[in-house]
Image (cartoon, coloured by chain):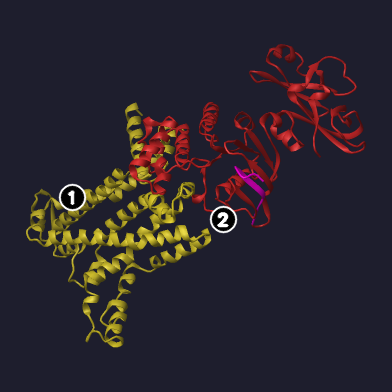
Amino acid sequence: MSDTGLVLKDVYRVFPGDITAVSDVNLEIENGEYIVFLGPSGCGKTTTLRLIGGHDDPSSGTITIDGELLNGVSPAQRPVTTVFQHYALFPHKSVLQNVEFGLKMQGMDKTAREQQATAAIELVGLSAMMHRKPRELSGGQQQRVALARVLVTRPKAILLDEPLGDLDRLLQMKMRVELRALQRDLGITFIHVTHNQEEALSMADRIVVMGDAIIQQVGTPTELARHPRNEFVAKFMGDNNVLHGTIESASGGNVIIATPHGKVEVAGTGKAGDKGSMAIRASAVKISTDAVPEVNGVRVRLNFVEYLGDSIKLHLDFNGEPFLAKVDEERFGEVQAYEGKEVTATWSVEDGHLLEQ
Amino acid sequence: MSSNDHSALDEAIAEVAQAESLMGGSSAVVATTGPRRSPLTTVAWILPGTIWLLLFLIAPLVMIILVSLWERTPVGFAAFSFSLDAYGRIFETSVFLDTLKNTIFRSLLVTALCILIGYPIAFYLARCVKTIKFQIALFIVVLAPFWVAYVVRIIAWLPVLGRQGVINYFLVEVLGVVDEPISALFYSTFAITLALVQLYVLFMVTPIFFQLATLDEAAIEAARDLGATPGKVFREVIFPLSLPGVLIGCIFVFVLVMGEFATVRIIGGGTIQSVGTLVNDYYTIPDLPAAAAAATMLVAVMTVGVAILLRFSKIREVV
């Protein structure tokens, strides 16, 4: 086990009534990493964050930071601080008073804390608003105040619960870049919880996908996008087609799976007769009017063409089951002509990959 | 309806919203960003309240002020015979002014005592009792005195504070610290203050309770997260955020005690006056214009008092 960074070992959280919110969480987070906990609501990601922040206690397991045990340590005493979901600013205090709060609680004298708070406010670009009340600020500005308020106490890690959830889309995009840049400058560990895949992919060093109270997969954004480990991750990350079937044969590092969509060949090992599932990214699917090949190809109906600006998403239908493909934006006119008609969807062996059962 | 009327209505709505936000609500936001209603609907909403206010507040007030300006006659007053004689009569001796000063002092004292006693009760109910079921149960217990008639609640002090009351019994018979029962226990400013606090403390508890019960828990959690001890969480976050409730409680108690009449009469036993009992005295003489003048002065002082309270709250920018 590592001596530095934040380490969660065998962490469980069971609520009264035998509701398991977090189960068997093992995770090592290096100092200075930007980690995003990603999952649908109720997956245990916020509970995990509260366990790290000290706002809830694990039923079993340990949480350490730089080798120091955090279990039982009050939130105030932990070297981690939380940016709450709706910012939780003090409505009766000015921006400056909000930001200096943590330092005031540490007993720092007025001039020193005001100096540091002013610097933190400058860092988030709100110097002009220093004496305003939170209600006089926009959502994005309130969020920056919340950030400055935790940054000023120089925590080892900052926990952010859905930090961009209250902002409109354009502001979200802007804050993603700003947050990430800020984190790189400061070199502080950021642990960010979200249910937004795009947000996770664009910001994280590593993403922790949670589902059904357990960690489904930990990986870099590219690992998760290209190689989802199981069906849950493949489906949650979106734009993946998952095919189920029975392994027919295995040879030369590849297996052939018989699925209702026809035979598919994919890299991996397995035993003939076992169940097998594979995922294929929508963007790896090619659409043509060619004949259906023997493996890795299906005849599908093009139901609907969704224009996304930089690409086109094709909603295909195979005997009532949805199938997705994504093609270049330039092909819009061409593919639109096929709306409502049959086309052939194919993919190459190396683009598909076998999922864990 | 002309566009002029529109803007007048809008202004009225904005004023209400501003007043509400001053009292701690976030309705200002709702009022300005809510869906646009048709002017007719707005009028329909405003009308019942306006009629009620006109009939039961504005009209009586105007009547009292008018009567105070009319000449006294042996049986009442001569309408539309304007003079300031009634004010001259009430300020002729120092009785009215002294009583007014005493009443103001008593109201401030009772208000302060109600904060001291009511705040901890409200705090306990709202923040220490964990389940809502118990909160409501205990709140009903706190409300219990209100099920008893007002005069009964006052007279109930007699067996406690009276010459043959519990306290005198202990002092004389059990402890023997005094030779004979102290009658001043009952017919005294002390007894009046005690009874008034008991009568009105609930008007302090209730608004503070609701303010404390609806605090933003996340802000409190954030304060703890940033290293605040329980005492500092209270001083820095909970108490300042509960001030709108305290303010409303203060207005209730101050106004009610300023207008007090029956408690002072019964427990004071005729030896202690309030502006309320003075008005009653003028009324029985009968000197109706003087009674009206005294009442007008009372309303004026109360209005100034409430205005000061609201002004104070604005300076503090209570949210």
Q: Which one is in front, B245 or A160? A: A160
Q: Which one is in front, A254 or B137? A: A254
Q: Residue B243: where, in percent of width, then height?
A: 36, 51
| Residue furthest to the front | A3
Number of other residues with Cα within 10 Å of mark 2, as a class: few under 14, some 14 to 19, many 20 or more: few
Characterize the magenta stretch by its predominant secondary structure. strand
Residue A2 forms part of the magenta stretch: yes
Q: Is residue B182 left or right of residue B135?
A: left
- The image's mark for residue A72 is 2
Q: Is residue B75 visible?
A: no
Residue found at x 26% / y 60%: B257
The chain identifier of the residue carrying mark 1 reads B
Residue found at x 64% / y 18%: A310
- In the rendered view, tell whether residue A207 sits above or below residue B190: above
According to the rendering, which colour does chain A have?
A: red
Residue contact at pointers 1 and 2, CB within 8 angstroms: no
Q: Secondary structure at mark 1?
A: helix
Quadrant in the rendering for residue A202: top right
State which mark lies toward you, 1 or 2. 2
**What's the magenta region?**
A1-15
Q: Is residue A126 visible?
A: yes
According to the rendering, which colour does chain B have?
A: yellow
Q: Residue A127: where, in percent of width, then height?
A: 38, 31
Q: Secondary structure at mark 2?
A: loop
- Looking at the picture, which amino acid does disc 2 mark? Gly
Q: Which one is in front, A62 or A162? A: A62
Residue found at x 65% / y 20%: A308
- Looking at the picture, which amino acid does disc 1 mark? Ile
Residue bearing mark 1: B65
Q: Residue A149: where, in percent of width, then height?
A: 45, 40
Number of other residues with Cα within 10 Å of mark 1, as a class: few under 14, some 14 to 19, many 20 or more: some
